[in-house]
Image (cartoon, rainbow, N blue to C red):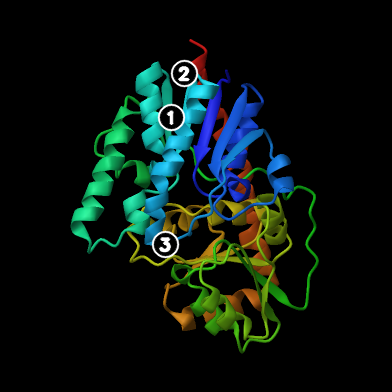
Amino acid sequence: MVDIVIIRSNPVVYDPRVAKIVRSLGKRYSISVLGWNRTGALKKTIDNYIVDLKLFNLKAPIGKPSLILYYPLFWIWVLIKLFVYRPRVVHACDVDTILPCYLYKIIFRKRLVFDVFDRYAMAYIPPKLTALYSLVNLFEGFFGKKADVLITVWEKVQSTFRRKPKRCAIIMNCPEDHAIDKVKSEKDVMILVYTGNIRRDRGLEEITAAIKDLKNVEFVIAGGIIDNELLDRMLRVSNVKYKGVLQPSDALDLEASSDVMVALYDLNVPLNRVSMSNKHFEAMMCGIPLITNVGRELINEVDYGIMVGYNDVNQIKAAVVYLRDDIELRRRLGNNGRKAFLQKYNWTIMEQELYKIYENLLEK
């Protein structure tokens, strides 16, 4: 028997939020992690994971509607593993893991933490599919109410749940501190960085168009490839470089060694209007400015970045040129972000919130 089993369907070994939760809870409790090896992660990578990690080894498409056909097999596998491990608490990450976790809670009268990284319907289902959109939101809302604790990443995401359990918490996607003692050299070329999935709703085409004719600017990207055609088009531009799929710590190192971070999100996706990207907090941690179209309230509070329009190539280009040509501005914005990170938006603070949740669940 273990204290806590954490379940995540997305590739666990590349998930920074899961890694932070596991490292924090592993300091106090016995932890195991269940995941889905959809992409065929290497055995060495799996064996070197932070704690005991068991993966459902069935390859499945990512970002395709046909993925739903594979879920019942994953859910059955998760439920069997929970019967074996008999954890005191099951920590379900997102709605696509919640069903077997809820069944386990009911059958064995154990505790359930529902950690909502993304509202599934708001992130993946077009609102024009009204019936399906409403059904998935209802499904997610039901389990949010039935959980012992509901965790979300931002206040606005929590507000999308009409009915909530007695205990709710906000654990923001703040990073651990990887930037201490790092000194940036003043380069002739300004490095603009993006880490995340290579997909169409991240403004990557617009950023590429904005920087393709700029001197002394290089756009470095890293992450899983959802859209091969998009990546191929981007790499035809000489000052765009692709670094592959990186472990979370390596992605943070890449960001910390860069000059400016970019995070653009298509606001036609409902989730992007209420969530808060972890890139905001990573930019703060790294002490570098952020170019973005979301999180205006945080930008206004801290003054660490520049707001642009998602589809406005001219605005994006102007922001890049502004930062390229003014090193002192980059330094000031970066210092503002770093100060806010140390004072308020860091994982050490989020970790304490996580401990409060589990002290209540396990140490009564």
Instruction: Identify the mark nearer the N-term, 1 or 3.
Output: 3
Residue reaching furthest top? 364
Between residue 19 and residue 35, name the one nearer to us: 35
**Amino acid at the residue labelled 3:** Lys
Mark 3 vs mark 2: give the one in front: 3
- Label 3 crowding class (10 Å Cα cut-off): few <14, some 14-19, many 20+? few
Instruction: Determine the CA span between mark 1 and mark 3.
Output: 27 Å
What residue does disc 2 label?
361
Q: Secondary structure at mark 2?
A: helix
Q: Is residue 80 left or right of residue 125?
A: right
Mark 1 vs mark 3: give the one in front: 3
- Label 1 crowding class (10 Å Cα cut-off): few <14, some 14-19, many 20+? many
Would you say the residues marked 2 and 1 are in contact, meaning their CB atoms lie under 8 Å apart? yes
Position above or below: 112 against 184:
above
Mark yes or no: residue 16 visible.
yes
Between residue 347 and residue 237, name the one nearer to us: 237
Point out which mark residue 113 bears: 1
